[in-house]
Image (spheres, rainbow, N blue to C red):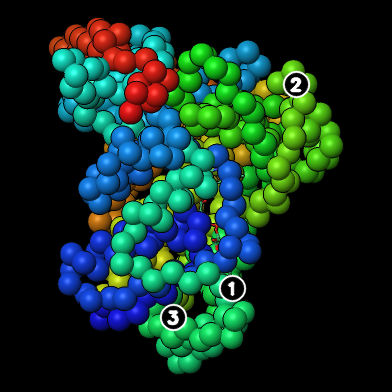
Amino acid sequence: MAPRHLVIVGGGTAGWLAALMLADVAGRKGWGTKITVIESSKIGTIGVGEGSTAVFRQMLKHLALDEAEFLRESGATIKYAIRHRDWRRVGHSYDGPIDDPSLLTPGLALDTYAVAAGRPVAEAHVFQHLLNANRAPVAIKDGRSIPASPFHHAFHFDQARAGAWLRKKAKGISVIDDQVRSVETGEGGITALVLDSGARVEGDFFLDCTGFRRALIGPLGADWLSYAHMLPVNRAMPFWVDLKDGVEIAPCTTAWAQKNGWIWQIPTQDRYGMGYVYSDAHTTPDQAKAEVEAALGHEIHPRNDIAIDAGRLKSAWIGNCVALGLSSSFLEPLEATSIHGTIVQLMLLAEWLGHPTGQVLYNAAVARQVDDFRDFIRLHYVSERRDSPFWRDVAESHPQNVRDRLALWQTRLPQAQDFDPFPLGLPHLQGQLYTPVLDGLGLLNRAAAKAEMETSPALRDKTRMAHASLVRDYTRAASQCAPHRAWLGSL
Ligand SMILES: Cc1cc2nc3c(=O)[nH]c(=O)nc-3n(C[C@H](O)[C@H](O)[C@H](O)COP(=O)(O)OP(=O)(O)OC[C@H]3O[C@@H](n4cnc5c(N)ncnc54)[C@H](O)[C@@H]3O)c2cc1C
């Protein structure tokens, strides 16, 4: 049965995405659900610069929200890829573009061809060309915007500004500024929330979007599954860096490997949201700050030093309560999996809320989603670097499942069957994301790719021609698109 009163606690990105998306579903399905958001201006939100995935844009389109308005009002920028500096070895860089050229060339193994030919697989991605040229995703002709590709790009944004915009767009929601002090429970789970003001809020379904506090799901006895033994970093030190006037904004997130972790750099239209994600088993906060300052060549002013307990809830849905966002899971932000995960989880919920087996299906899907993200992130650490105790420890501790997959991909390149479809056909990690990372790290086997290509010379020739034509078209398309920063300023 659909909920009559859905209570969302938390007014961060997770809470407002939930309000927007579930209000839309309730309206479409005629549920007649009342939605209340309880947020606390005394606590505030996590407040970091964030990179999204393509799913964020799909969500905007689905809700008929205007992308140009979002970019303008939240100061967001375009993201085509993640640029990985110094991961394979110091001085080496590779990009992981997020579009999927295989959708345009069914039956052709573009990646295998590229690896066999000794060319970077990212070359067949239109997003790589747009990134190389620092271009907007559109060309402007006679005052009209012409999209450069059929793929959804992603965004970088400042969490506070994007949150304020999402909040403005959520219509018909009751909002209470107060703090949940305690949770009343009965047979089916939560019956009411007691607030600091003494008010009592009853509901029949609750979303815990209270971030690391887990104010609702915690009292229900939720168990945390830690990934600390699988992921090597456990602290994040965010800071901001000014964006210089007149300098182009590269439309990518930069993940820059250091001696004890890595620095993220996320451009918005006004500044870079940056941070050092590091291992406190290998360095101290003071040393970490000094390491960043030496890398950047200037002083930084850390805004925080957050402990990361990487992992997820064993069950994100307990009784009549679902945890979303940071209260449900958290991983280092290397592949921008957090907001992506939240949006996909809301899509699952939209389908399974009120369904007799919804809870079981949902918990299994979310567990799989976050475990898969964990394994993909861990793979990024398979490096040639041995220049610090951190990298030497990492090299000796790759989990068995990561080793097994790498061994398989030494015999052939990743294939579609290596990645089970995600429930309801929703977006998830697949070969198009894995292959550029494996290629960038030098983990694909050229001899195996050549052998595969040689099994069918006719197919190889067809693939070679398709590859050449894509590269030519994309180079031309990128040269015709508007410069990224100027285009953002024109919106
Ligand atoms: C260092 C770092 C970098 C990150 N980078 C990325 C990235 O690049 N890409 C990405 O996708 N994600 C990233 N994330 C994750 C991303 O920030 C979160 O997924 C996203 O902001 C959602 O946060 P949230 O809404 O769950 O929590 P928060 O932003 O912490 O919001 C919690 C809300 O709950 C309210 N609240 C808390 N307790 C109570 C209570 N008792 N009563 C009432 N209200 C309460 C607060 O007032 C607040 O409104 C990053 C996170 C960190 C820590």
The picture places residue 295, in percent across and down from the top left corner, at 73, 21
Q: Earlier in the sequence, mark 3 or mark 1?
A: 1
Vertically, is 289 above or below 373?
above
Image side of residue 383 versus residue 8, left or right: right
Q: Nearer the viewer, residue 322 or 361?
A: 322
- Asked whether mark 1 and ligand 1 are closer than 8 Å, the reply comes as yes
Q: In the displayed orientation, state which residue is furthest to the bottom.
A: 187
Residue 131 — which label? none
With 169 as the anchor, is 216 left or right in this view? Answer: right
Rate crowding at label 1 as few (under 14), some (14 to 19) or many (20 or more) other CA atoms within 10 Å.
many
Q: Amino acid at mark 1?
A: Gln
- Specify the amino acid type for callout 2: His
The first of marks 2 and 1 along the sequence is 1
Circle nearer the viewer, 3 or 1 = 1
Q: Residue at x 62, y 26 (%)?
A: 242
Q: What residue is disc 1 on? A: 179
Separation of marks 3 and 2 at Cα, in angstroms: 51 Å
Give the structural element (helix, strand or loop) at label 1.
loop
Residue 160 is at least partly visible in this image = yes
Name the residue beneath numbered marker 2.
Answer: 298
Residue at the spot x=29%, y=30% of the render? Answer: 100
In terms of depth relative to the viewer, which is nearer, 328 or 101? 328
Residue 260, image x, y percentages: 73, 33
Residue occupying the point 51% across, 86% down: 200
Q: Quadrant of residue 37?
A: bottom left
Q: Residue 319, labelled with which disc?
A: 3
